[in-house]
Amino acid sequence: MMGKSRLEAFSDGVLAIIITIMVLELKVPHGEGWAVLQKLWPVFGSYLLSFVYVGIYWNNHHHMLHATRQVSGAVLWANLHLLFWLSLVPFASGWAGENHFAPLPTALYGVVLLMSALAYWLLEWALLRVPENALLSQALGRDVKGKLSLVLYLLGIAVAIQLPALAWGIYAAVALMWLVPDRRIERQLHQA
């Protein structure tokens, strides 16, 4: 077993790079009127939602690791798996925004969100297999919100081809669900 400081530092760095890559996709418009800015709303909208998602993952990752005492090799690989899927957010976000939320880019965006959520769940599972992380196990409990998120992502992907606007609404609803940091971990840490 090993400490968690390198894992936290590496993850923070990768997430900062992901956000930087996303903002670089926002091209400065040529012109000065509102009409020029209105053309950018799909790109900015997908950037905004993606920024919120990366922020949610960073926040909950921070809370989860705060309740973690030790990590293992499996945890390191599970964390890399999560970072892989999160690193695809700028691509999926940019493709969806550039194509005005077309069906296939919208579905792919949902797949990236779904796979990121599954990767986060695998990271939780790997952390819970480390005996020194009993506090985290108590804090996570049944994880109803996490399971509901997976179902909603699947629903968003399923409707994306016919109703991409509804899919984006579903993706935004999941983000709103997670906007407040995971209080289960905070409560458990205050009780310990």
Image (tube, helix red, strand yellow):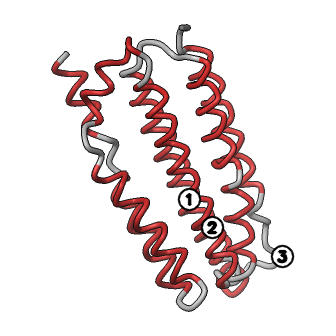
Please state if 129 lies on the left or on the right of 190 as rendered. right
Q: Position of residue 179 (x, y in %)?
A: 37, 52
* Amino acid beneath label 2: Tyr
Q: How far separated are the C-alphas under marks 3 and 1?
A: 32 Å
Q: Residues within 10 Å of mark 3 (few under 14, many from 20)?
A: few
Which numbered tag is attached to residue 113? 1
Secondary structure, mark 2, is: helix
* Badge nearest the viewer, 3 or 1: 1
* Amino acid beneath label 3: His
* Amino acid beneath label 1: Leu
Return the disc, 3 or 1, that comes first in the chain's sequence.
3
Secondary structure, mark 1, is: helix
Q: How far separated are the C-alphas under marks 1 and 2?
A: 6 Å
Which residue is labeled 3 in the image? 30
**Residue nearest the viewer, comparing 183 with 42:** 183
**Residue nearest the viewer, comparing 28 with 32:** 28
Secondary structure, mark 3, is: loop
Residue contact at pointers 1 and 2, CB within 8 angstroms: yes
